[in-house]
Amino acid sequence: MRPLIDAYVAVRDFLELGGDVLLVILVVTFVMWTLILERYMFFRTGYKAAVARVLDEWHARKDRSSWYAHQIRREMVSDVKLGLDRNISFIKTLVALCPLLGLLGTVTGMIEVFQVMSVSGSGNPRAMASGVSKATVPTMAGMVAAISGFIFSVQLERRAKAEAEWVADELRPED
């Protein structure tokens, strides 16, 4: 139980060190990683079932060569692609938002530094330390969140594209 309490205290202290913007970065990062994990779970479970259903439906058709069959094939591939691409754009948006929130933290921290300087003068480094930490910690947190999210969003995007191409190849029309 003690390690859990120590972890809680460390996270609380870190959030206090970075200010309110750091809490927003934490929430955005949590949502981003929830969506990333959801996509990986979809590729492990839901995608396989959807592809099996589409393949069975296509192979059960007698007509696979007419114009109408080609349009049905196009619709099936499009439906699978929509399922594969779900939330990837939102994940990419959250990835792009993280460094911007870090920059917001930098600006708010620097405003705090300037307020301290205007009140106590520029010769009190201890008074300015709080603002400097509020300026640097959110920037670092936003960049770390963005880099980690970027790596996985690119992997998800590539996998979605490859799987969509595979499904399109498997649903071969008869010429």
Image (cartoon, grey):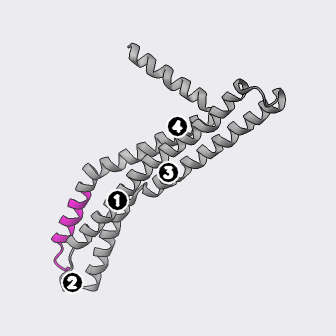
Disc nearest the viewer among 1 and 3: 3
| Residue at 56 percent of width and 48 percent of height | 99
Nearest the eye: 135 or 80: 135
Residue 51 falls inside the magenta stretch: yes
Magenta part of the chain: 49-65
Q: Residues within 10 Å of mark 2 (few under 14, many from 20)?
A: few
Mark 4 or mark 1, which has the lower sequence index?
4
Q: Residue furthest front?
A: 123
| Residue at 39 percent of width and 17 percent of height | 3
Under tag 2, what secondary structure? loop
Q: Are marks 2 and 3 in contact (CB under 8 Å)?
A: no
Q: Any mark on residue 65, and which?
A: 2
Question: What amino acid is found at the position of numbered circle 3 in the picture?
Answer: Val
Q: Are marks 2 and 1 in contact (CB under 8 Å)?
A: no
Give the labeled residue for mark 1: 84
Give how far across and how far down residue 115 sits, in percent: 79, 33
Give the labeled residue for mark 4: 26
Give the labeled residue for mark 3: 95
Mark 4 or mark 3, which has the lower sequence index?
4
Q: Any mark on residue 25, and which?
A: none
Q: Residues within 10 Å of mark 3 (few under 14, many from 20)?
A: many
Give how far across and how far down residue 76 sits, in percent: 30, 69
Question: What amino acid is found at the position of numbered circle 2 in the picture?
Answer: Ser
| Dominant secondary structure (helix, strand or loop) of the stretch shown in magenta | helix
Give how far across and how far down residue 101 sits, in percent: 60, 45
Give how far across and how far down residue 43 sits, in percent: 28, 52
Under tag 3, what secondary structure? helix
Nearest the eye: 57 or 134: 134
